[in-house]
Image (spheres, rainbow, N blue to C red):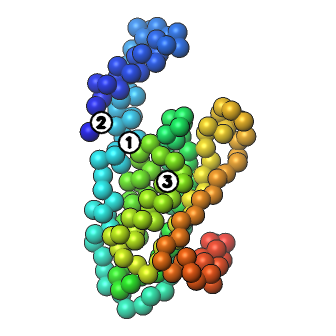
Amino acid sequence: MIDQNKIRQGICLLLEGIGEDITREGLIDTPDRIARMYTELFSGMEEDAGEHLSRTFHVDNSEMVLEKDIAFHSVCEHHMLPFFGKVHIAYIPNGKVVGLSKLARTVEVFARRLQLQEQLTEQIADALMEHMKPQGVLVMVKAEHMCMTMRGIKKPGSQTVTLARRGVFETDHLLEERFFRLLKQN
């Protein structure tokens, strides 16, 4: 459970720690604004991806389903700075599919937590495998990290790409190639 009072206290300490006057007009409401913002940004802490993936629909075919360019924003657990980008999800149904919005909702559940991109990619793939039981899943995440842009190496525009393959995507390289060909199409 997110504790807004602790967040407010922490922000006051942070502001004082960097030498700010927390009674200054522009900062008086900042701890409350940040507490509300963090409640929204980290709402995935209290959500279960299984809720979104539990309603399925029967299908007879087992052709690849690809949902690409699912935009997301998350916060890196190492520096608590944002990272953002796109998620591409492919799966091979095993007699059932989910509504396309449910894939985007699943991304949001995991993105709205303190995260590592590698972990985010794995969590999405594992949730799909666990709750949908498809023949296979491939998740690709492509993101820019503000910890690379704003601090440290300061290289804006650099992107990190992570993949998680499950089931038939681990063994069928033609299927994986088909995924990458489909990603390139408009």
Instruction: Looking at the image, tell me whether mark 1 or mark 2 is earlier in sequence order.
Output: 2
Task: Residue type at mark 2: give it.
Answer: Ile
- Marks 2, 3: nearer the viewer: 3
Q: Residue at x 58, y 83 (%)?
A: 172
Q: Is residue 158 visible?
A: yes
Q: Is residue 140 left or right of residue 177?
A: left
Task: Residue type at mark 1: give it.
Answer: Phe
Q: Residues within 10 Å of mark 1 (few under 14, many from 20)?
A: many
Which quarter of the rendering shows the C terminus?
Answer: bottom right
Q: Which residue is mark 3?
A: 119
Q: Residue at x 35, y 86 (%)?
A: 95
Rounded to the nearest angstrom, the CA distance separating label 1 from label 2 is 8 Å
Q: Quadrant of residue 99?
A: bottom left
Residue 39: % across, % down: 34, 37
- Circle number at residue 42: 1
Residue 125: % across, % down: 45, 66
Answer above or below: position of 15 versus 76. Answer: above
Q: Is residue 26 visible?
A: no
Q: Which residue is mark 2?
A: 2
Q: Residues within 10 Å of mark 3 (few under 14, many from 20)?
A: few
Marks 1,2: beta carbons within 8 A: yes
Looking at the picture, tell me which residue is in the foreground, 185 or 43.
43
